[in-house]
């Protein structure tokens, strides 16, 4: 270690403030500065917002492996050619998956680590699909910054270093031989890298190059799929090359509700973005004109979120297996009935009966009007704890979201998509794009979406304020967690209403968001997450 100033990059004893960032020609906002700048570099080289988004997403697999990877899933909303397009790149469970095996092994819920939690990854296919449909530059050019960072190394960001250490401790408890490749890849020195320390992954760079040159074919029907197949077979797991070969990106029609004159958009199920829309449907029947930092406002929003979430966990699954349609869950009449359940005290939520009828987020925009809301994830941290040898591919654990209840529409079955937590968001008004937004963080995501949307629309906050505001989250029953920024008087008042309140000392579980909106001047305004290493890169 050379001469230099020593300091603690994870300690900040004074409050700091970020300003809204403005740009005219283009903007990229995400949780890692190097990835954001890579996206901006692609814009300056003649790429559009989609190229920038894919470049940023690929960089994030390198610079923030604690939350996503090549072996994860991807959802995106793209505003192009005057309309919004949806992309669902979540994969199916292996054809060999079966409930009996899990039950016979004695599991009471789907395992979080190991092979049972692995479904077909969608990230590489998502990059290729976005590039082919909307991109201007070759995928080899778009993935070049990520390949360089992987091959030559980069200084690890503070929030990433913290999560890396936690993952090292967690995976160190796993004794199976299949987990050793995670340590070989991500902790070759027997420890997690420190903040500011250079880290590289030559095998990750080679894998990204193969994906770029083959437009992801190598991952699903080539050399990489063969390596995944061999790794799975060695450990007697379900996933096979045939499962990978059948993967297809799915272009979908985004779903929406109108909230006080703005159209709020999400990806339809199997994702749980519908949860945010159901909550907003309930909330629009309330007057939220009082100040945000008011215990009544908190109470109403929490109650609406609880009702929406309990419905989503009961009803949302692979749409081929759902008992109720998206239209039924978003019906105005159903929201009206659910709204009636909200009173002065905390309720214990139960699912209703509709009428029959660890993740990274990024936002990108360009001067031509294209905008992208993109989220990709390994689900919890690095994912399953499995890394395909000599590839840098950390396999996600999205299968953990399957249910073992045979009566559930989300029960584990072969060739089925699980309930999915990653959700990109988008705002439009009167048929014109306003901009992309998102808050990553597993089951915090729809709760974060509702909070940033109401912050901007109901309380008139700018994008940075909307992200800075203290957050709450419902976890189960009457249990509510709140950040330190929530005032003591509000916390006491909520407890008096019957909420089981917990003031959290750390903000890690409250999600990390980004927002880009178009201003009345035709310029772009961006906000980035103060709870992580985020940056808005503007031009």
Image (cartoon, helix red, strand yellow):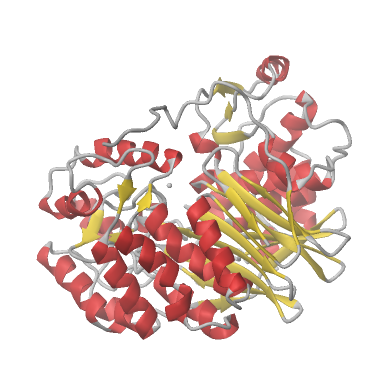
Locate residue 38 relative to residue 538 in the image: left or right: left
User: Residue 25 in the image: x percent, y percent?
Assistant: 72, 68
Residue 86 appears in the figure: yes
Residue 430 left/right relative to 505:
right
State the image quarter where residue 69 is shown: bottom left
Give the image location of residue 436, x and y in percent. 68, 60
Residue 316, horizontal then vertical, whole percent = 54, 58
Quarter occupied by residue 388: bottom left
Q: Looking at this view, is 48 or 462 the one in front? A: 48
Q: Residue furthest front?
A: 3
Image: 152 above or below 133:
above
- Report the front residue among 418 and 396: 396
Q: Quadrant of the C terminus?
A: bottom right
Q: Nearer the viewer, residue 1 or 404?
A: 1
Q: Residue at x 24, y 58 (%)?
A: 387
Relative to 487, does residue 189 appear above or below in the rendering?
below
Which residue is drawn at the image coordinates 26% and 83% (left, top)? 222
Is residue 114 found left or right of 323 in the rendered image? left
Residue 406 visible in the shown view? no
Q: Position of residue 258 (x, y in %)?
A: 81, 59
Q: Quadrant of the N terminus?
A: top left
Vertical position of residue 310 compared to residue 63: above or below:
above
């Amino acid at each position: 270690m050379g001469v230099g100033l020593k300091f603690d990059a994870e300690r900040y004893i004074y409050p700091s403030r970020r300003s809204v960032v403005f740009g005219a020609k283009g903007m990229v906002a995400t949780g890692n500065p190097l990835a954001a700048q890579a996206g901006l570099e692609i814009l300056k080289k003649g790429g559009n917002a989609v190229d920038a988004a894919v470049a940023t997403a690929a960089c994030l697999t390198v610079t923030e492996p604690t939350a996503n990877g090549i072996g994860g899933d991807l959802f995106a909303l793209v505003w192009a050619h005057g309309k919004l397009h949806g992309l669902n790149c979540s994969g199916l469970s292996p054809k060999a998956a079966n409930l009996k095996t899990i039950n016979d092994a004695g599991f009471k819920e789907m395992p979080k680590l190991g092979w049972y939690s692995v479904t077909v990854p969608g990230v590489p296919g998502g990059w290729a699909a976005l590039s082919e449909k909307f991109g201007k530059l070759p995928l080899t050019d778009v993935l070049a910054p990520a390949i360089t960072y992987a091959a030559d190394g980069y200084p690890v960001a503070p929030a990433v270093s913290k999560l890396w250490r936690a993952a090292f401790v967690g995976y160190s408890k796993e004794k199976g031989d299949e987990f050793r490749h995670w340590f070989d890849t991500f902790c070759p020195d027997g420890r997690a890298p420190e903040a500011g320390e250079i880290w590289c992954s030559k095998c990750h760079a080679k894998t990204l190059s193969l994906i770029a040159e083959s437009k992801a074919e190598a991952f699903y029907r080539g050399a990489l799929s063969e390596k995944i197949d061999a790794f799975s077979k060695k450990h007697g797991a379900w996933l096979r090359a045939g499962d990978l070969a059948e993967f297809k990106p799915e272009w979908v029609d985004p779903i929406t509700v109108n909230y006080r004159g703005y159209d709020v958009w999400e990806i339809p199920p199997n994702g749980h973005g519908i949860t945010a829309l159901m909550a907003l449907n309930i909330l629009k029947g309330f007057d939220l004109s009082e100040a945000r930092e008011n215990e009544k406002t908190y109470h109403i929003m929490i109650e609406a979120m609880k009702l929406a979430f309990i419905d989503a966990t009961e009803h949302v699954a692979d749409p081929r297996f759902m008992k109720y349609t998206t239209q039924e869950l978003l019906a105005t009449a159903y929201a009206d009935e659910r709204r009636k359940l909200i009173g002065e005290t905390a309720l214990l939520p139960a699912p209703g009966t509709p009428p029959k009828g660890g993740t990274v987020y990024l936002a990108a925009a360009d001067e031509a009007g294209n905008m992208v809301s993109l989220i990709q994830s390994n689900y919890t941290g690095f994912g399953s704890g499995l890394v395909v040898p000599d590839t840098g591919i950390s396999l996600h654990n999205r299968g953990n979201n399957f249910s073992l209840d045979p009566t559930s529409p989300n029960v584990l079955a072969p060739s089925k998509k699980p309930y999915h937590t990653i959700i990109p968001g988008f705002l439009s008004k009167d048929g014109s794009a306003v901009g992309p937004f998102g808050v990553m963080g597993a089951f915090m995501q729809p709760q974060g979406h509702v909070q940033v949307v109401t912050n901007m629309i109901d309380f008139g906050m700018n994008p940075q304020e909307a992200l800075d505001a203290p957050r709450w989250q419902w976890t189960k029953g009457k249990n509510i967690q709140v950040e330190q920024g929530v005032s003591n008087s509000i916390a006491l008042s909520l407890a008096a209403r019957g909420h089981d309140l917990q003031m959290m000392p750390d903000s890690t579980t409250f999600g990390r968001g980004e927002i880009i909106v178009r201003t009345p001047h035709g310029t772009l305004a961006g906000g980035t997450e103060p709870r992580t290493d985020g940056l808005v890169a503007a031009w």
